[in-house]
Image (cartoon, grey):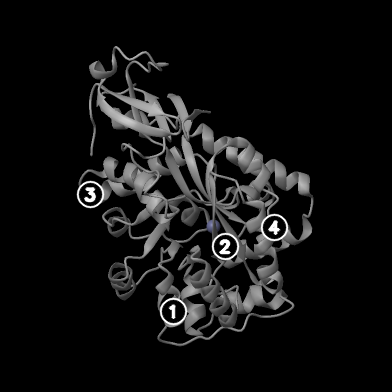
Amino acid sequence: MGLLENRSLLLKSNKILKIDHKNKFKDLNYKKINLNESIIIPGLVNSHIHLELNWVHKKLREYKNFPEWLNQIIDLKKNNLNKNVIKKSIKDAIISSIKSGVTTIGQISSYNGIDIPIINKYGIRCCYFYEIANSNKDNFIKNLKVIERRLIKKNLISIGIFPHSIYSLDTKIWETIISICKKKGYITSTHLSESRDEVQFIKGNDNKFDNLIFQKLISTPNIYRRKSFSPLKYLKYINFLDLNPTLVHMNNLSNEDKDIVKKNNLRIIICPRSNVFLKEKLPDLEFMLNYDLTGLGTDGLSSNHDLNIINEMYFLYKKAKKLKIKNLKEKILYIATLGGAKCLGIDNQVGSIQENKKADLIGFKITQKNPLNSILYDGGKNINLRMIDGKII
Ligand SMILES: [Zn+2]
């Protein structure tokens, strides 16, 4: 739709009822919110975050590559079973998100629902992905039923399944997950093509998952590998792509992979600062920013400096500026709103300011000549309205 001037929004309960010139609503006798010189955008969507991993950030030691970092995460998670530390992380991560203008999160959850009451209390919209990895694969069907029960009547929270990655689960478990998702109609997402080692791993070449991570596991995942596979071609081979999944990271794609992405209309979430944090390369930004089904995430604080989505957008802007992409600022705003909503399967409800959509809105005081700069440049300091589902937060 682009930028419209001198507009007002008429809201009813949790929805946008009407969008029109401000004079049209002048005489209506409803409660008014006057934001003066402001720009209103759809609420920002942080489509990939691990709320519960804030505490990890301070405990990280030096690492040279992704597997060495993952090795630390596995140990840290195994040794910290202190629920209060995890709950505090969840709370802090939600507060940082809301502060930076996020109204919807794609939360990857690995602690069996400990986060549900906290997410519910803060009233943030959430696609709740139950994460399945090597450590919890044996009882995931039982645990998932508990999560399903706990999410009943939580209107702002929907459920999805998140197999952690191709290297952390048996091919057989992937097949079980695929059949459950097909039966229940769950949305699904996974980390994919995140590291150079992952690409070598699925080909059966020398890699640090085999040489470092698997050395410490009690049971090594049984994964079907082939020289001709890429991470994406493996998921295609096991029919995971039939589920129309949302693939997170995708920063190590071949040209053939990009063709598969386009042909299958696959949804992609990029987390550029996380890739740099983990000493991996950035995704092909020209491809991602010109693709209709890209969303943006910060990932967890375990692989980022903060959870501020506007800082993520600004970082992306700085990196992509050299590429001479047309309407770059608009495109970044798109992937952080409607693109993200598409990745989470809720674009019929949120992601744009449209009549009948949910009133998830963020207002920014205009501080720069180009209103889009008022969004991108100040890390959210000039936000003057935060609304989720029609409620001011
Ligand atoms: Zn992640």
Q: Earlier in the sequence, mark 2 or mark 1?
A: 2
Q: Earlier in the sequence, mark 1 or mark 3?
A: 1
Vertical comparison of 378 with 303: above or below: above
Separation of disc 2 and disc 4 at Cα?
31 Å
> Residue at the spot x=32%, y=73% of the render?
260
Q: Position of residue 371 (x, y in %)?
A: 29, 28
Task: Tell me the mark number nearer the camera, choosing from 4 and 3.
Answer: 4
N-terminal label among 4 and 3:
4
Q: From the viewer's perspective, is residue 272 above or below residue 9?
A: below
Q: Which residue is mark 3?
A: 325
* Residue 343 on image: x %, y %: 41, 55
Q: Is residue 282 visible?
A: no
The residue identified by callout 1 is: 239
Is ligand 1 closer than 8 angstroms to the Cβ of mark 3? no
Name the residue carrying label 2. Answer: 64
Marks 2 and 4: which is nearer the front?
4
Measure how far apart labels 2 and 3 are at the Cα level.
32 Å
Amino acid at pointer 1: Asn
Are there few (<14), some (14-19), or many (20+) residues within 10 Å of tag 3?
some
Task: Confirm or reject: label 2 Cβ below 8 Å from ligand 1.
Answer: no
Which circle, 2 or 3, is nearer the viewer?
3
Secondary element at tag 4:
loop
- x, y (%) of residue 285? 32, 56
Mark 2 residue element: loop
Please state which amino acid type lies under the numbered disc 2: Lys
Where, quadrant-wise, is the N terminus in this rendering? Answer: top left
Q: Is residue 271 visible?
A: yes
Compared across the picture, whether 31 is left or right of 212 comes to left
**Which dot, 2 or 1, sits closer to the camera?**
1
Q: Is residue 4 left or right of residue 361?
A: left
Q: Which residue is mark 4?
A: 112
Q: Quadrant of residue 38?
A: top left
